[in-house]
Image (spheres, rainbow, N blue to C red):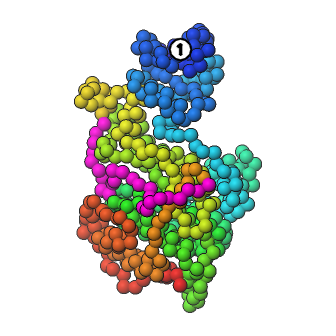
Amino acid sequence: MAGGHIVRTRHFKLLGFVDDDRTKVGRIINGVPVIAASSISDFVRTWQVTDILLALPRATRERRNEIIAQLSALPVHVRTVPNMTELASGSVTVQDFRELDIEDLLGRDPVPPQPELLARNLAGKVVAITGAGGSIGSELCRQILAERPQRLLLIDHGEYALYAIHGELAALCQQRGLAVDLVPLLASINDAPRIAQIFRAFLPATVYHAAAYKHVPMVEHNAAPSVVNNVFGTLNVARAAIESRASHFVLVSTDKAVRPTNIMGASKRMAELVLQALAARGSIGVSDGSIAALVPNRTCFSIVRFGNVLDSSGSVVPLFRQQVANGGPLTVTDPRVTRYFMTIPEAAQLVLQAGAMASGGDVFVLDMGQPVRIMDLARRIIELSGLRVRDAETPHGDVEIVITGLRPGEKLYEELLIGDNPEGTPHPRIMKAREDFVPWPELSASLDELWAATQANDVERIRAILAQRVSGYESESGVVDHLSVAGTQAPRPAAPVRGLERPG
């Protein structure tokens, strides 16, 4: 604990230690007392404590959450330090104080991975990851690297994101003595010839497709390119996987695909339908100039669906932290909004294990725990920063929470299942959903219509086609696509676009 005030040297004054161990309470360490957890409130008031530092390296997340919940009611800034021993020895400096990790606010203890599942489709294999520089894609890369694949294909359309993850993985290879061939490949999943060339050249055995446009309002305002990316980009990568005879293909999906109210969720469900239909298809048709042929489909397709990941790019937690640093206000769209959250490492680990259990066409759903009210999350971040929420009950508080209203396409609550009665799997955090799908001949006709609508920027038609094929899709807002609002619409193409021939 640090209290009184920060002296001119900007160092803190250590006032005491808190411990659950009754045998330690009352002891003096380096001249300061050890007090019981039950005495924290009185101690804070008596000594005017301003900061509490957590040093709980061995505590479970559940216990950490209990402690943090207790501290959130106190007018103190809660942060973490490496461990109690270093704190007592004086080797910890102010620079070692860290804000609470978001998993300290919402996390749960992860289930230990099953090593045989992790290694099954990775060890000694050529593995490809699309969206390799993104939040989920980059964590998949880190965890796949530890399983010692022969080669790791890093596919991303963003130059800097690709540069960053390649540099990080190269350093990890050097530190750990890993002989993994890292291949950074600049490519958009919308560039079907480029994706096909990559797959023909490197013949990946396992593919993780994490590339997607995911931000709901951004997709709602840019409907056509988002549908092209999420639906037809997925089809491009899937076709390349079949043609190059990849053994496994795993789509990273989202809870927003379940009874969606937005184009992002509907486009992700459409991508799921594409894979489910392909999984049931024994062969696909390919065309190379004047040559047409059937390629047998030996690729095992699966889908892993989960909710929000903590601290991903553009997510609510980094936004709240920045808003607190700026003095507020924190913006919440609706006080009733809830979301499922999971840490990025846990999500990536479960994606790898789920994909290894696939038999073809599977839709796996990750156990996300209990949904969290975003309003409660906002309050907790403010209070654990040592500040008070300014509201009607506390008009002289420090930071206000402002309700801004639901954005176009945004839901109050997210779901993970379309159907009922999910099946269990050998992993306690992974379930298998029972989801209907559309056979390829029917779906491919809708895909042709959807492609034409995207090329014409006909957002009303895009929404109508998605509503026809995606169960439960019902938009609660009008068209807000920027080009449509501006009155811009491209002419409808007269013929199907080359490179999207339907499987035979």
**Residue in the image at 58% along x and 80% along y:** 282
- Residue 165 appears in view: no
In the picture as drawn, the residue positioned furthest to the bottom comes out as: 290
Expressed as whole percent of the image width and height from the top left, the position of residue 324 reads 38, 34
Expressed as whole percent of the image width and height from the top left, the position of residue 238 reads 55, 71
Q: Is residue 403 magenta?
A: yes
156 to the left or right of 223: right
Expressed as whole percent of the image width and height from the top left, the position of residue 48 reads 42, 14
Q: How many marks?
A: 1
Residue 129 position by quadrant: bottom right
Pick the front one: 74 or 236: 74
**Residue in the image at 53% along x and 59% along y:** 423
Pick the front one: 385 or 192: 385
SS class of the residue under badge 1? Answer: strand
Q: Is residue 40 above or below residue 336?
A: above
**Residue in the image at 48% along x and 71% along y:** 274
Magenta region's main secondary structure? loop
190 to the left or right of 178: left
Magenta region, residue range: 401-426
Expressed as whole percent of the image width and height from the top left, the position of residue 301 reads 57, 68
Give the residue at mark 1. 35
493 to the left or right of 68: left
Pick the front one: 252 or 156: 252
Q: Does the magenta stretch include residue 244?
A: no
